[in-house]
Amino acid sequence: MDKVFIRGLKVETIIGVHDWERGLVRPLVFDLDLGTDFNAAAASDHVRDAIDYAGVQKTVEKVAADYQPALLEALAERLARTLYKEFPLLLSLRLVIHKPGAIPVQDVGVEIERRREDYAACGMR
């Protein structure tokens, strides 16, 4: 499977379970691997046949800014569902969300992997 990747996408948003976190805008850093098939895009050389990574960036920024959940896990799932809905050429997704400074370690966050089939059985919500 072919992949489009995005590394180090920084988004400022409100996220967290503690009251003090809900009053602060904090950075999150996103890494995405977007599985797809490059054959149509390679043949046509047209963005309509590819996953538009600028569009993915805007989607991640919008969902993170608008949703503002307590948990990274909830944000990851919302993002996965939204990306599958908005990008029909997306076949698989690996999404990592880093939350710098959440605890005193080098890095902390969540990682999910989803396939389009994960949502086909239960429908898109």
Image (cartoon, rainbow, N blue to C red):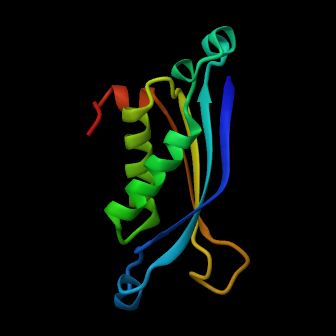
Is 19 situated above or below 10? below
Q: Residue at x 46, y 56 (%)?
A: 61
Residue at the farthest bottom position: 20
Of the pair 77 and 4, the residue shown nearer to us: 4
Q: Residue at x 60, y 84 (%)?
A: 103
Of the pair 46 and 15, the residue shown nearer to us: 46
Is 117 situated above or below 79? above
x then y, percent, for residue 91: 53, 26
Is 101 situated above or below 120? below
Residue at the farthest front position: 46
Q: Residue at x 61, y 11 (%)?
A: 40
x then y, percent, for residue 72: 46, 65
Quarter the C terminus occupies: top left
Residue at the farthest right position: 106
In which image quadrant can residue 19 be found? Answer: bottom left
Give the number of marks: 0
Is 46 situated above or below 22? above
x then y, percent, for residue 101: 61, 82
In which image quadrant can residue 2 be found? Answer: top right
Residue 57 horizontal side relative to residue 17, left or right: right
In which image quadrant can residue 41 be found? Answer: top right
x then y, percent, for residue 58: 47, 49
Residue at the farthest top position: 43
Residue 70 horizontal side relative to residue 41, left or right: left
